[in-house]
Amino acid sequence: MKKILITGGAGYIGSHTAVALVNSGYEPVIVDNFSNSEKSALEGIKSILGKEVKSYEVDCLDKNGMEKVFQENDFSGVIHFAASKAVGESTRLPLKYYSNNIDSLIILLELMSKYKVKDLVFSSSCTVYGQPKVLPVTEATPRQDAESPYGNTKKICEDILRDFILSGAASRIVALRYFNPVGAHPSSAIGELPIGVPANLIPFVTQTAAGIREKITVFGNDYDTPDGTCVRDYIHVMDLADAHVKALKYLSEQKDNFYDIFNVGTGNGNTVLEVIKTFEKVSGQKLNYEIGPRRTGDIEKVWANTDKINKVLGWEAKYSLEDSMRDSWNWQVKLGKK
Ligand SMILES: NC(=O)c1ccc[n+]([C@@H]2O[C@H](COP(=O)([O-])OP(=O)(O)OC[C@H]3O[C@@H](n4cnc5c(N)ncnc54)[C@H](O)[C@@H]3O)[C@@H](O)[C@H]2O)c1
């Protein structure tokens, strides 16, 4: 069985990917410092799989700690999820973001080279596209100046991976540019843990329906979109997890010194009001929302062209927006007032 190191594996996307890997015959090993997750995620994974996934409480910035993990396991690949991801916080604490997100990648690449682990899947983001001039965005769409230190770390990490491969490294690397991950495992055993006031729409929606927040403000309804509200490409986390499994398989078929990038989205854009209405329909909950002014830094509209990942990885999104809203709501019901 191929052992795969998943950094940040107790987090939202990592925990779902751990489950998908086991279900596809891989043996994931989780490394997490629980800075943005709880150990209950490991229990959730165990309850879905009926067995434990091996895990280490180690900080990816702790090179000695990480080296011990490499010494104790014969990995065939790595998925690097571990990063700090709050856009707003990154503008207040840029050094935390540059250090955690960039140094962790460098340490990982050094250890992968030393221990001859070739395959890496890296978590990038559609944030690298900014507000694209032409939609939907393909992987060839030019990247733009980042809107935040967080977004810049993703750009810089992509550049590091490109330069690493250009230097002749034997590695095989894929960067996946996620669009907007939503939903939860259909069992509600794992999902996205809310920490602080959510900056993303869906946790705000579910928390408002659960009575944790009084109302949702929709930031702007005068954009150039079908109903004036912002458009995003919402991708179910189960589909996203599956994309990582497909990416690992694809890497194992490539020659050494390989780097490629894929969009991971549904290929459809939905407005904020469409999301709210879909949520109300599937949950039976009426949402208290109001229209407010535009929020600085918000992109008007972005969604993915997914031709490349559909063709090359043989992956496509299977879950609908309804599925995403249902699973997000069921997860919130399980969390209760959290
Ligand atoms: N969720 C999104 O909207 C989204 C969109 C695009 C890209 N991404 C990227 O996908 C990846 C995973 O995102 P997520 O939503 O699952 O986030 P998450 O915060 O739920 O998961 C990240 C995990 O990494 C851990 N971690 C952070 N720094 C660490 C360190 N130094 N050492 C060890 N563990 C560490 C956290 O404790 C957490 O469990 C991140 O790289 C993120 O930037 C996320």
Image (tube, rainbow, N blue to C red):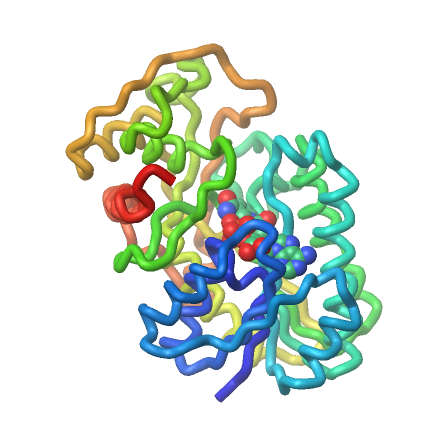
Report the front residue among 119 and 90.
90
Residue 267 relative to residue 165: left or right = left
Across and down, in percent, residue 84 comes to 63, 47
Report the front residue among 140 and 228.
228
Across and down, in percent, residue 142 comes to 65, 41
Q: Residue at x 37, y 21 (%)?
A: 216
Q: Residue at x 61, y 67 (%)?
A: 57
Across and down, in percent, residue 12 comes to 47, 54
Q: Is residue 311 visible?
A: no
In which quarter of the view is residue 182 placed?
A: top left
In which quarter of the view is residue 127 placed?
A: top right
The answer to whether 312 is drawn above or below residue 285 in the figure is: below
Q: Is residue 194 visible?
A: yes
Residue 293 relative to residue 325: left or right = right
Report the front residue among 313 and 331.
331
Q: Residue furthest right?
A: 167
Q: Residue at x 56, y 43 (%)?
A: 126
Q: Residue at x 65, y 68 (%)?
A: 173
| Count of all numbered marks drawn on residues in the image | 0
* Quadrant position of the C terminus in the picture: top left
Residue 93 relative to residue 15: left or right = right
Across and down, in percent, residue 318 comes to 30, 56
The answer to whether 104 is drawn above or below residue 116 in the figure is: above
In which quarter of the view is residue 111 placed?
A: bottom right
The answer to whether 36 is drawn above or below residue 53 in the figure is: above
